[in-house]
Amino acid sequence: MSETQAAEEAKGTAPSSNKPPIIRLRGIKKTFWRGKEPVRVLENLDLDVPDGSFEALMGPSGSGKSTILNLVAGLDQPSEGTVEVAGQVISGLSESRLARWRADTIGFIFQSFHLIPVLSAQRNVELPLLLTSLGSSERKKRAQTALRVVGLEDRAGHYPRQLSGGQEQRVAIARAIVNDPRIIVADEPTGDLDRQSADDVLGLLTKLNREFGKTIIMVTHDPAAAERATITRRLDKGQLK
Amino acid sequence: MNLGGVAANNLRRNKLRSALTIAGVAIAILAFVLLRTIVEAWTAQSSDVANDRIVTRHKVTFVLSLPKRYVDEVRGMKEVKIATWANWFGGKDPNHDTDFFQALACDEKTFFEVYDDMRTTPEQLKAFKEDRQGAIVGEKLLKRLGWKVGETVTLTSQIFPGNWEFHIVGTYEALKKAVDPASFLFHWDMLNERMPKAFQDQVGWIVARVGVGSSAVDTSKAIDDKFESSDVQTKSQDERSFQQSFLGMFSAILTALNIVSAVILGIMMLILGNTVAMGVRERTGEYAVLRAIGFLPRHIALLVIFEAGVLGIVGGGVGLGLAYPFINLGMGRFIEENFSNFFPFFRITPESGAISMAIAVGLALCASLPPAVNAYRLHVVEALRRIA
């Protein structure tokens, strides 16, 4: 347990440690290859993320933060070790099973929003639901609900170019939660936002964590963002400090 | 909304690029349809002919003539139902010196029986048979040269000297695409009488229709066998083969047109492929995000293929939409009016339209394959790292 976590638990803002972890990383090693030269990003990393927690991962560039996110989300495979998320050992799953699992379990928020510019906010939010068997009206209903959660129900018909950066990120959050995932993975969600918009987005993430019980794991360089998390972990040279 | 809808919407991202690509596809399809129509119009003369009609000509070349007595011998064969003959006259209207049309000296008694795909009225046919100077003129030629039924016209010939005066007693209507709707037909006897003695009683070619139970191939062989030991040997072919051997002289032009068509389609495919590839390159980040939220590689590849398909459908549709009025109402009418000897029917056929559309979509899909494969192989983590 990290110092920060202990401090948060002492403040009563962290989830109880007796809750089973929703994310378990054991003996994780991750090596990338730069030509013939191996680059070791993660070294024997163990990590437990309790269900319902809001974790911030901080650390310098190249410390392995995004790699952990990618492993947790099943976008990448460890060189060694096991990744268990929401009761499923995902290291070793086939690409198609991983994609289906990801669609059901993980919601993604990116620094640069990555909304499709020719689709309205509502249609952007609907995108993950295209992978389900839901009918058009049900998809629309759920997208509107997600937009209501992020406070943008009145912007459903707007295109990304008609929205501010903060609003775009909120649409991206609505897209992340529309299929009701247990875990939200956020990679620098406030990196492209001004302070006010960043606070709004962080407030929204806090709400998703506290009111909707979503487990959030967020990579950030922003201390103000990390302050909103219930647990903050620092990563350096592939090791949790 | 579905994947197809997302792909169609993607075309709105860079409207100028999409519009230019659609214009490129449309122009390529328009050019392809035009070239195909030329080839079809040219070859229609051999594809839309009577199966039971046999043309017999001099074995060496159709420029040389046959003795007229051969007609009676052909008529006497058990395989032959009826036979007629004709000579090329090479007529011109001195008032329209540059206007080319087919003028034939024919047997007025049997010509329209053998060519039952040229229709005239019984009254006009009777008048034709009874008037030695009578002529039956195709409706299009009559209109083109401003002639009227009942009028006397004078023709000259590049082959037969002098002025030739005819009474236009009627017109005929071409019932098939292959039939020239602008021919000039007059009595062979009139031509024969004015020939020098040594050149009389010669016919250009004989046209026979085979009887029930006989085949065109066997009858052709039987006719040629019959004259094999004569001083003038013959070459008989069913009408389709005869037309094809004539068209064969222009096969190099048709081949060139087909090659140009293929080049145009190749360019169209490159334009499409380039547009789709640029789109894929620009959207690498979005595709990575879609993969991250659960889309499979094949979904991303399908998005790319759908997008190219929409470009092909819209471009092909616009091209065909332009081609129909341009060819069928404008250029085609002009050609049919003025060059009906070569192109009696110059229109886009439904088959051509369907083939062009299928080619537009098919090539669009082919063009999308390399970028679709790249999108399929997208390495999500790498792509996300690039856009982070």
Image: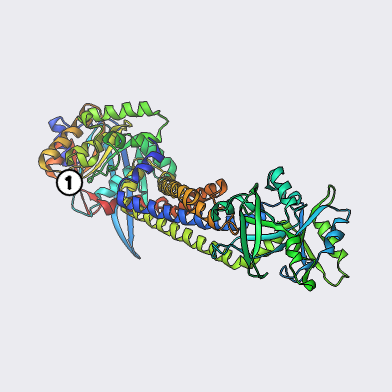
Can the viewer see residue A93 in this picture? no
Is A38 situated left or right of B340 in this image? left
**Residue at the spot of label 1:** A192
Q: What is the count of numbered marks? A: 1
Q: Residue A138 appears at what percent x and percent y?
A: 36, 26
Chain to which the residue tagged by mark 1 belongs: A
Element type at marker 1? loop
Q: Is residue A80 left or right of residue B143?
A: left
Q: Residues within 10 Å of mark 1 (few under 14, many from 20)?
A: some
Please tell me whether residue A193 is drawn above or below residue A35 in the rendered image: above
Q: Is residue A94 above or below residue B157?
A: above
Residue at (34, 42) in percent of width and height: B9
Question: Residue B2 falls in which quadrant of the image?
Answer: top left
Query: Which residue does the image show at 85% across and 48% down from the upper left?
Result: B213
B156 lies above or below B272? below
Q: Position of residue A191 (x, y in %)?
A: 17, 46
